[in-house]
Amino acid sequence: MPSGRILTTHTGSLPRPEPLVELLKAKEGRQPYDRDRLEAEIQRAVREVVSRQQQAGVDLVNDGEMSKVGYSTYITDRLTGFEGEAHDGPTQLADVADFPDFARRYMGTRPLASLRRPACSGPVACRDLSEVRRDLANFKRALAEASLAEALADRAFMTAASPGVISVFLPNSYYPTREAYLFALADAMRPEYEAIVEAGLVLQLDCPDLAMSRHGEFAKLDLAQFRRQIEVNVAALNQAVANIPPERMRIHLCWGNYPGPHHYDVALRDIIDVVFTARPAAISYEAANPRHAHEWKIFRDIKLPEDKTLIPGVLDSTTNFIEHPELVAERLCNLARLVGPERVIGGVDCGFSTFAGPTQVSPDIVWRKLASLAEGARLATSML
């Protein structure tokens, strides 16, 4: 085990303070807002979120995505080519479509439902790196103030949207094919990816497209056809990170961060070989929620490549239940006994605040859940 014990982390987004949420919403909605106040609130929020992670016992920390209105749509402030507007809403998820009453009761209240969705209407390119450099400076300053800069030099991480997930949320109306759009996004995002790693941080690439799009935009395809689509997504991702050492990267895949039916979710067994072809060395994925908590068993007969590490979610990011440390330990031990404890890091199914706005889990409960994760990892270490 790294450092002789099972380490802990999370997926990226953490609850934002309400004053910051209001400013982010104003910026996103093209409403007047105080830029200096926004920057001050971001810096304050990053300092606090780093400190709260430290207090909870999280080993591999990040900036909580404090500056981003959404984990995928933030890129419209950093790339050219998104001057258009999507005229249709987000792709209807097949599992939700089966239950109209659920859709009315829950899905329309999510922050995503009111999020501005630009469309790609021109050539995509990196506008400049000023915003990512600001994020890096704010995060590294917060690490230093928390006396974590030295200890976490190889453990702090920063998230970035993958080409595939950008294509899911920001539709293409310019490039002749989906593949052309993906590879253009790969080239445009490469400078951000490389800047994060050059700053000494681990890069996390958010890739919900590798699983969630099976019951989203590709719901009408059969499994073989879907696999071919995500193989293209991985190829674009690999092109974008070709210059970055695999051990400096991790990816996150999920089936959608919402407490819905999920009865059409693609099985992890059916996509894991494609996921293994992605260059990042660590794989973060949902392993705690009721639809996927059993899938640790696939590693009984699927060999984990020697250069890969698993970050199973052992906390559900959509429920206010605080998982018992013994359950956390049990989940970690189940997997660790199959692949080796040195290749397991305790994680969370998905982000606790993937879009700025109301969170599914009360912020105070988020921190108690993360503390339970840390305690469970300590227990698992002693058990193993």
Image (spheres, rainbow, N blue to C red):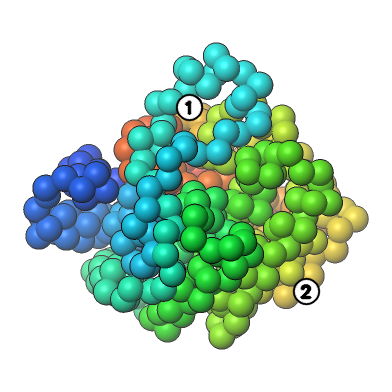
The span from disc 2 to disc 1 (Cα, nearest Å) is 40 Å
- Left or right, 95 with respect to 49, comes to right
Spot occupied by residue 277 in the image (x, y as percentages of width and height): 74, 69
Residue at 47% across / 23% down in the picture? 106
> Which amino acid does the dot numbered 1 rest on?
Met
Location of residue 103 in the rendering, given as x and y in whole percent from the top left corner:
53, 22
> In percent of the image, x 47 and y 52: which residue is there?
170
Could one spot residue 43 in this view of the protein?
yes
Q: Are marks 2 and 1 in contact (CB under 8 Å)?
A: no
Q: Residue 306, which numbered label? A: 2
Dot in front, 2 or 1: 1
Please indicate whether residue 343 sits to the left or right of residue 49 in the image: right
Residue at 57% across, 45% down: 349
Task: Give the residue type at disc 2.
Answer: Glu
- Residue 107's label in the rendered image is 1
- Crowding around mark 1 (Cα neighbors within 10 Å: few <14, some 14 to 19, many 20+) is some
Q: Nearer the viewer, residue 155 or 245?
A: 245
Upstream in the sequence, badge 2 or badge 1? Answer: 1
